[in-house]
Image (spheres, rainbow, N blue to C red):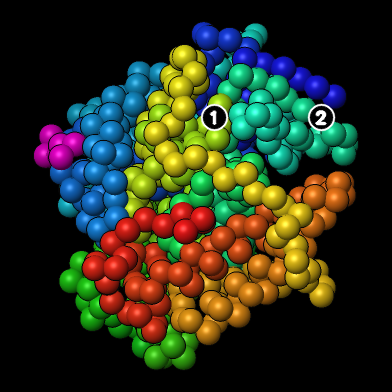
Amino acid sequence: MDVRGDVIIVGSGIAGLRAAVELAPAGDIVIITKADSNESNTEYAQGGIAAAIGPDDSPELHAKDTMVAGDGLCDERAVQVLCEEGPRYARELIEWGACFNRNEDVAPALASEGAHTVRRVLHAEDATGREIGRVLWGRISTSARIRVLTNTLAVSAIIEDGRCLGVRFIGERGETGRAFGRATLLATGGAGQVFSQTTNPEVATGDGVALAYRAGARIADMEFIQFHPTALDVERAPRFLLSEALRGEGARLLNLAGEAFMLRYHPAAELAPRDVVSRSIALESRKSGGPVFLSLRHLDAGDVHRRFPMIAATCLKAGFDLARDLVPVGPAAHYVMGGVETDLEGRTSVPALFAAGEVACTRVHGANRLASNSLLEGLVFGARAGRAMAGPAREAELPPAVFRHTAAMAAHCATHEMSEHDIRELMWSSVGLFRERSGLSDAFSVLHEQEAALQDRLASGTRLDHEQWRRASLVTVASLVARAALRREESRGGHFRTDFPHHDDLNWKIHTSDIQ
């Protein structure tokens, strides 16, 4: 089955939807989404969206906080775009009917989160992503020029003469097809499912990064993975995210003895950058031999339940009263700072292939993303990509694409095919919060063999089903992350090496790509 549109959008999260809003007047759009149209990382985003709209705030201050959190590796131009254009897009959402929380004076109620120096986070209770998705779908749902293919998995790019003409896909019943357009946007979100412990939904398997990599696009900064410090840590229960906003409203982290411990690790305590809080929780748990808890007991119980209804309901299902109980928490993979390298309009190194949102790497987050900048990134860079796709074709000012000969990669095939479970466990144990050379080297060696065997299968024309493509994405992305983490011999942001525990600005205050 072939479908055609002026543009193809792969993904239905905030970046893809905001691009669609921009593109809707310009032509026919085909949106391909691997599950239900509402299933994305955007849907699970709780805390809010950061934007400098408060009376004590400014884009310059927001940019400063973003740069500090990014630990020396943020691209200043990208940060300037994000923070200067952010207020416009936040106000646009309000004009379109987004129901953000408001103060008694009807002004938006701004929350505080880690590493922000002022309150600047707009929120819709604790389901902000869902509310933004509702608004954006509302903007495009009445358009007759938008076609949505649900439960459809994009598996590879169609490349002719070095240019992307669209994507190949597998439909809901296993049927194969092609979607052709003059421009294609990857807005596929993150890759948290590469790790056994993650806050991400099942769909976050890094499909866009894997697809772009196999198409020859440059992939950058994959060593920088953000581990969220506070995921619900209960045996046989999903690692449900307990939003940073909880700590922004005063929640404390307590060890097994009931002691607040974060001041021993950072002067900002619970509101330190996420990488610091995550490692601190892990270290404190090792010292005590027991779990770390999130406590809101000292806050008004009614206020807690009103402010965080979704989180409270989920905790109750697991047997905890969010306002009164000590809730066990631990770190989990949450966000990929790296991804498909793009310019500030979403262009990749492959002509006519664009990327925006978490799948992309504009280097706006540097080595560590500032809390609640992800939804803002999707809005700002999704809109910019949409405008660029609607305009005249122009290539990115990036080094050229790398058209890899996949058959040659498989000189040494893996002796056996690792299960998805084994891949995810290997990544968590060897490429997780704490990394060192021997573990990284062993992990990369195994994963590189798995990637070589996969590329050999693809080069031979073997057809894969949905589950096999899911594993293919995990193998490819895991190999990229392990290789990048092994290469960077320093610690910075979300990348921590126990054998190189300090910054090395002389040698490593640089960005990396998969071809270096």
Q: Nearest the camera: 297 or 126?
A: 126
Q: Quadrant of the N terminus?
A: top right
- Amino acid type, mark 1: Pro
Q: Nearest the camera: 334 or 261?
A: 334
450 drawn magenta: no
How many numbered marks have been drawn onto this rendered protein structure?
2
Q: Secondary structure at mark 2?
A: strand
Does any portion of residue 488 appear in the rendered image?
yes
Image position, residue 368 (x, y; %): 35, 58
Image position, residue 178 (x, y; %): 77, 28
- Amino acid type, mark 2: Gly
Span shown in magenta? 55-60
What is the spatial separation of the Cα atoms under label 1 and label 2, in whole angstroms? 22 Å
Tag 1 near tag 2, CB within 8 Å: no
Q: Secondary structure at mark 1?
A: loop
Say whether disc 1 or disc 2 marks the residue closer to the N-terminus. 2
Question: Which secondary structure is most common in the magenta stretch?
Answer: loop
The residue sitting at 47% across, 14% down in the picture is 392
Label 1: which residue?
Answer: 351
Seen in the picture, residue 486 relative to 307 is either above or below; the reply is below
Seen in the picture, residue 304 relative to 212 is either above or below; the reply is below
Report crowding for label 1: few under 14, some 14 to 19, many 20 or more residues within 10 A (C-alpha): many
Label 2: which residue?
Answer: 177
57 drawn magenta: yes
> In the image, is 62 to the left or to the right of 458?
left
Which residue is at the far left?
Answer: 56
Disc assigned to residue 210: none
Seen in the picture, residue 433 relative to 453 is either above or below; the reply is below
Report crowding for label 2: few under 14, some 14 to 19, many 20 or more residues within 10 A (C-alpha): some
